[in-house]
Image (cartoon, rainbow, N blue to C red):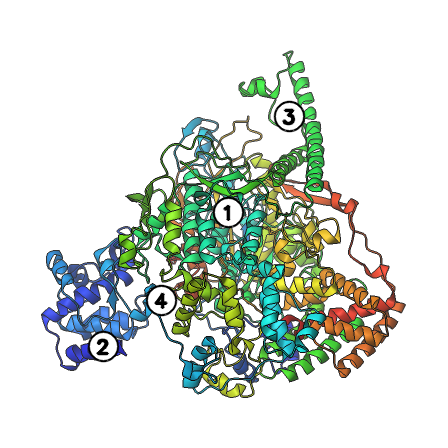
Amino acid sequence: MYRSCIFLAFYFLFVGCGGVSEEEAELIFVHEVQPLLQAKCYACHGEDPDEVEGDFDIRSLDGMLAGGESGEPALVPGDPDRSRILEAVTWVNPDLEMPPKENDRLSTQQIDRVHQWISGGAPWPEAGRFAELLRVEWEYADGIQVATSGGLSQEWTNRRYKPEDLWAYQPVGDYTVPARYLKDRKNGHPVDAFINRKLSKQKIPMTVRADLEILIRRATFGLTGLPPTPEDVDAFVSDSDADAFEKVIERLLESPGYGEHWGRHWLDVVRYADTNGFANDYERPNAWRYRDYVIRSFNNDLPYDQFILEQLAGDELDPGNPEMLIATGFLRMGPWEHTGMSVVAETRQFYLDDVTNSVGETFLANPLRCARCHDHKFDPIPTQDYYKVQAVFAPVQFAARNASFLPSENLVGFEKGKERLLDLKAETQRESEQIRDKEEAAAKAWFEARGKPYLSKRDRRKLPDDQQPPRYHGLTHQDLGYRKLLNKRMQLVHRELDRYDSLAFSIYNGPAVSNPHSVRRHVMPDDRSGNPQSTFILTGGSVHAPSDSVGPGVLSALHITDDSLTQNKAFIPDSMNGRRLAFARWLTQPDHPITARAMVNRIWQYHFGAGLAGNPNNFGVMGKKPTHPELLDWLARYFVDSGWSVKAMHRLIMTSEVYQRSSNHPRRAVVDEKDPNNALLSYFTTRRLTADELRDAMLFTSGELNRDMGGLPVKPEINMEVALQPRHIMGSVAPAYQPSQTPDERNRRTIYTYRYRGLPDPLLDVFNQPSADVSCEQRTTSTVTPQVFTLFNSQHTTDRALAMAVRVNKLGGTIEDQVRHAIELAWNRSANDDEVAESVDYVQKMVAYHTANPPEVIEYPTRVKRTMFEEMTGASFEYEERLDVYEDYVADVKAWEVSEEIRALGDLCRVLFNANEFIYVY
Amino acid sequence: MNKNLFHLRNAHAARALNRRDFLYGLGSSIGAVAFSSLLMQEAGEAALSPMNPKVPMLASKAKACIFLMMEGGPSHIDTFDPKPKLNELHLQKFERAGSQFSAMSSGNRYYVRSPFESRQVGESGADMCLPFNHLGEVADEICFYRGCQGESVNHPTAMYHMNTGNRFGGDPAIGAWVTHGLGSINSNLPAFIVLPELAYPQGGASNWSNGFLPAQYQGTPLRSAGSPILDINPPPGVSRYHQRESLDLLESFNQSHLEKHPGHDELSARMDNYELAFRMQMEVPELIDIENEDERTKELYGIGASETDAFGRKCLLARRLVEQGVRFVQIYSGGWDSHDFLERAHGTLIRSIDKPIAGLIKDLKRRGMLEETLIVWCGEFGRTPDNGVREGGVAYGRDHNPDAMAVWMAGGGVRAGHVIGATDELGEKAIDVVHPIKDLHVTLLHLLGLDDNKLTYFHGGRYKQLSQTGGSVIRELIA
C-alpha cells in the first residue's frame, strides 16, 4: 500500500503532468537509471574490454550516442520514441531484446524511468555532480536503503530495496495472538489463531480433526520417522483422556527414534556423508561421531543456541571436551579432496568458499555464495561481507583430533572390523610383494646381463635411463594393472584403520598447511604458531586475483541493535583464536533477526511439508516470502523464550488444531480454487515417505529392524548388480561393495548406513534421497517409474516381505488371522472384511502357484571377476576379487527356507508395502 | 518418424491420463504441477506436463543429440590436432614452476612427440592421426574445433564441468537441460539416456544428474551388462501371471483407498505408474536388442570384431534410441588418461571408436537422420605436449591440459567440413577462436534450438542456466 501510493505520486508528478524537467531527469538518472544500466547492461556492454557485445559501450553518454555496430545512436535525448535503447528494453522488436535473459527483463516501472529520463533530455552528470546528486534525499525513490559495510561500487551501496524484501533483516516483530479467531478464546491455541485468521479472511472453510488412527501414524512418522506399533495405536484410540494426544507426543519425544529422525533432517542440511567425494571418495573414518552427536543433541533437546556454538566453535568453547571437538565436524561436512593433481591454493579456497556458503545456508538462511564474485545481486550483502565472514574461518585447519570415546558412544564391532582390515592389509602386502619380487628378479637379470652389480630400486632411482632397467621391466600389463589396484587398496585400508582410533573428524586453529593430501590422516601440529591465513576480496571469486584484504566480520546489514554494537557483541577479534566463537555468539543473540526464524521455519516445514517461508535456506529477496509473517515471528520469539528448545516447538505445533486436521476436506473443490497448494493449511497436506522412512518402515514392519543406536556406519544389502559393478576411483577401481555380515549388523536405521558420496544406494536414490554434495533444505518427492521397479521387483522388497510373512506366520491362527495381522502391521489400522477376503483369496492362489513353482536356491558369490581397461596399456585386464564377507555370511530369510504358505504370505506383504496407504502419510 | 513410435503412441491413446507424465514421472508434487487440471486434460496433450514435447525456442535442424564422451582426457595432439614441431623437440628438457600448477605438471618436463603419423583427410584437409582409419571417410561431415578451454586440471571436476557446466558437481547435466527444454517425444522411454562403461566414471552418476531440475530429467543409464535398468525384471520365481495377480490386488487396495481420500490426485498418478512399469518390462528389452538389425548394419559399426564390438553396440543402440524419440544419448568411452604408454593406450582406444563412430555417421546419413541429429565428440580436457617422466620412447605419455583440447561436432546444423580455431605450435594452449566450455555448451543448446539465456530454472535464489552466468554462441561452428 505504502509503495503504491509513492509510486502513484511519482507517476503523476513526472508522467501525468507531462514533461520531466532536466533536474528531475538528472535525479532519475542518478538514483534509478544509472544503477539499472550498471546492473543489467554493463557486464556485456563495456565492463569487459575484450568482449563488448555488438561493439556497443553503454557506460557513457558518448557511447550511448555513438551506438553499436549498427551505427545508429542508441539514444536520442528528448525523444524516447527514436531511442533504440528504449526499443530494446521494451522487447517490441524480436531482433532487439535486451537484456537477453528473460528473467532480467526490465519491469514496466523501470521502463517508465528510462522513458522519463530520455524525455527529460537524457542528462548524464559528470562524476562530481553525480556524487552530489546521489546525496540528495531521493524522496520519490522506490524502496529503502540499507546501511552495510559498503559494496564494490557506490551505486550498489546506495541502492534501494523493497521493504517487504527485507523482512528477514527486520527485527523479529512482537505480535499479539489474534485471539478473536479462536473458538475458545481462553483455552485456544496461538498457532490456530494466526492460521485461522488468514483462512477466515479468505473465507476458506477448514476441515475436521483427523481420525485417531491417522493422527497417531502422522505424529509417529513426524517425530520418529517410523510407523506406530499396533499396540501404540490401540492405546491411543482407547485413551479417553483429554490429553491423550499430548501423552503420545511426550512418549515420542522421549523415544530415541526422535533424535534419529530429526538428526536426519539436520544432516540433510549440513550434507553429512562418510566419504570425501571427488576422485578417490576416501572414507572419513570418524565422521560418524558427528552424526551421533547430532542425534544426541536432538534427543537431549540441547538448546539450539548452544548447538550452534558447539558446531561453529566447540573447540574454542571447551577444548578439553571431546564432544566439542566432534561437534566442529560441522565445519568439514562438505565434499572436499586434495590429491597429487590438485593445486593447494585452489582446494583451500574451495574449502573456504564452501564453509562460508554452508554457514550462510544453514544458520543465516542465505546462500552467501551469491556474493562471492560480486556484491549480492538481490540482497544487502556486499562482497566485502562475504569475505569478512570467510575470514572468520581463515584459521581453520583440518585434523583428526584425539578425542576419547564417550561412554554413550557405540563401539560395537570395533574388534571384528579392525581384525578384518588387518587381514586385508596383510593379504594386500603379500600380493604386492610378489609383484615387487618379480620386478626385482627381472632387474637382477638385467644388471647381470650387463655384468653390473644389482642395485635396489631406491639406489638406482637417480641413475640415467640407460644405466637402469626400463620402467616396469619384467612386468606384464596384468601385473601393472593389478599393482595399481593393490596400491589403492592399501591406501584405503590405511584410511579405514583410523576408524578404530579415538579420533574426531575435526579442526584446529593454525597457520596455512602446505600439503593437505587427502590420502593421509590430517594431524594437528604441536607448533601452531604463526599467523592465520590472510583473507582478500577475490576479484571475480578467483583465488589468483586477490584485491583488498579484509578482517573477520559479520553481515553488516544485520546490525542487531545499537546496544549490542556498543557492547561489542558483533566484534570479531583479529587473532588466531576466538573468531568463530565471537561469530557464533553474534549469531545466537536472542534478538538476531534470522537465527530463530530460520530454525522455527525448518521445524514447521518438516511438520507441514512447507515452511511458513517457502525456502528454508533462503530468506533473501529471491526466497519465497512468508505466508504468515506474524506467526513466524511469534514462533521465533516463543522459541527463544523457551530457551531455544526444539522439543518445546514440537509440543506447541503438534497440539494445535492445525496440525491435527484431517487430510480430507469436505469442500476440497472450493479450497483448491482459492488455495491450490494449501498454503493456508485448511487441511493437512499428505506427504510421501522419504527414502529413509520407507526403508526404515519396511524393516520395522517386517520385524527386522535392529534399534541399536550410533556407532560405525553399517552396510545394508544394496542392489547386487550395483554392489559388484566396478567404480572408478583415481587411477583404479574401488573394491566391491559388501554388506555387513549379519542381519543384526546391517538391518539398522538408514541414518546409520554408510553414506558414500560416489555410490548412492539405488533404493534410496530412486526415492529422492538428496545428494550429499549440496545442502538439502527440503526433500523432493517425484513419482517416477523406476520407483515401481525398485519397490516391486527388488531383492530388498522380497526379503522384507518374506521376513514379515515369517513374523505374521509365527502368530499361528488361520490364514485369515494372519492376513488381518499383516494389514494391521503395514497400514497401522485394523483391516476391514473386504480387504481380508480379497487377501485370503490371493494368498490361496499364490500357495498353489508356489507349490507348482518351487524356488531356486541362489547363493551369494564369494568371488567376483573383474574386467578393467588399463589406461596405461590400452588393454583389458582381468582379475578376481575375493568377497570375504560372503565367505561367512548370514543371509536374511530366503524363499527356499520357508513353506509355500509363507512365500504366498510374503507375496501379500509385498503388495501391502507397495500400496499407497503404506507409502503416504495423511 | 518411424512406425514403432507411431504404434506405441496410438496403442495407449485412449488412456485418460497422459502417460508421458509417468515415465519419468509426475514432477515435483510440491506445487510444481496442478494435478487436478492435468487430469482434466484428456484430449490434447497436457501442456503442463514437464515431459511433453515443447516447441524449440529457435529454428534448428537438430532434434536430438548423441554425445560421445571420451573420459580421461583424450590427447588432441594424438588425434585431431597433430604437432609436427614436437618431432624436433622430442625429449628435450625444460622446467615449469608456479603456484598454479599441480605436482603433476611442474618440475622437470620433457617434450614428447606423437607416436602416430597423421594425414589430411576429406575436402577440408582436416588433420587426423593414423589410427583413425575409417573416420577419415566421413571427415567432410565433421566440424573440428580446436579453440575450447576448460578450467580444471583434475578428472572429476573437469568431467563435472564438461557434463554440467559446474566444476563442483550437483548441477543438471546437459542432457537434463536439453530434456527440460525440448521435452520428450516418446512417452515410453526416458528422454535422456546414458550408455556408460561397465565402470562408472569418476564422480559417478552425478555426471548425468538432473541436479535441481525435476527428477524426470535425470539421465537413465542403460547398463551395458546385467539388467539394463535396475530391477526392471521381476524377482526370481515371479512369473507374468504372478505379477498380474499381485498388481490386480494392489490396484484393488489402492482403489478403495482412493475412495476414502478423494481429491488426492497423487494417489491415482502413482497407481498408473505401476501399469506403465508392467509394460516397460516387455518393451525395453525389445528396444535394446540389436540382434535383429541386418548384418550389413552391424558390420558397419564394427559389431562382431573384438576391438570395436563394445563401442559399436553402443553407437548402434544410440541410433535406435534416437529413432525412438530419445532426445539426448550420452555414450562413454573410458580410459583415455594416458600418462604412460600413449601409443598403446591411445592406439587401442582410437581403434575401438574409429569404425563405430564412422559407422554411426554413415548410418544416420543413409537413413536421413544425420541432419536432425547432432553428434558431439570430446573429453574433459586435452593433454600436454610434454611429460614429467623420461622413458626412452616406449612408456611415455602426456599429462592433463585444460588449455587445449579436441572437440568435434557433426550433423544437425554444424559447419561440416571445416577446422575452426587453433592451438599454438606445440599444442599447449588454444590461441584462435578461443572459448570457454560454457560457450561450447551454449552453442550445443543453440544447435538444438535452445537459448541458454531463456532455458533457465529458478533454484537457490536465482534463475540458473547451463552456462552458469551466460555465454555466447560460437558462430564459427554453425553452418
For label 1, the residue is A329
For label 4, the residue is A172
Residue A316 horizontal/vertical position (percent): 43, 43
Q: CA distance from mark 3 to mark 4?
A: 73 Å
Q: CA distance from mark 3 to mark 1?
A: 46 Å
Residue B161 horizontal/vertical position (percent): 47, 51
Q: CA distance from mark 2 to mark 1?
A: 50 Å
Circle 2: element type: helix
Q: Looking at the image, is mark 2 or mark 1 nearer the viewer?
A: 1
Q: Nearer the viewer, residue B197 or A117?
A: A117
Residue drawn at 33 percent across, 61 percent down: A379
Which badge, 3 or 1, is on the more N-terminal residue?
Answer: 1
Circle 1: element type: helix
Quarter of the image holding residue A224? bottom right
Q: Nearer the viewer, residue A56 or A38?
A: A38
Q: CA distance from mark 4 to mark 2?
A: 28 Å
Label 2: few (<14), some or many (≥20) within 10 Å? some
Looking at numbered disc 3 in the image, what kind of residue is underneath it?
A: His
Circle 4: element type: loop
Circle 3: element type: loop
Q: CA distance from mark 3 to mark 2?
A: 82 Å
Specify whether disc 3 shares its chain with disc 1. yes
Q: Nearer the viewer, residue A119 or A638?
A: A638
Q: Looking at the image, is mark 1 or mark 4 nearer the viewer?
A: 4
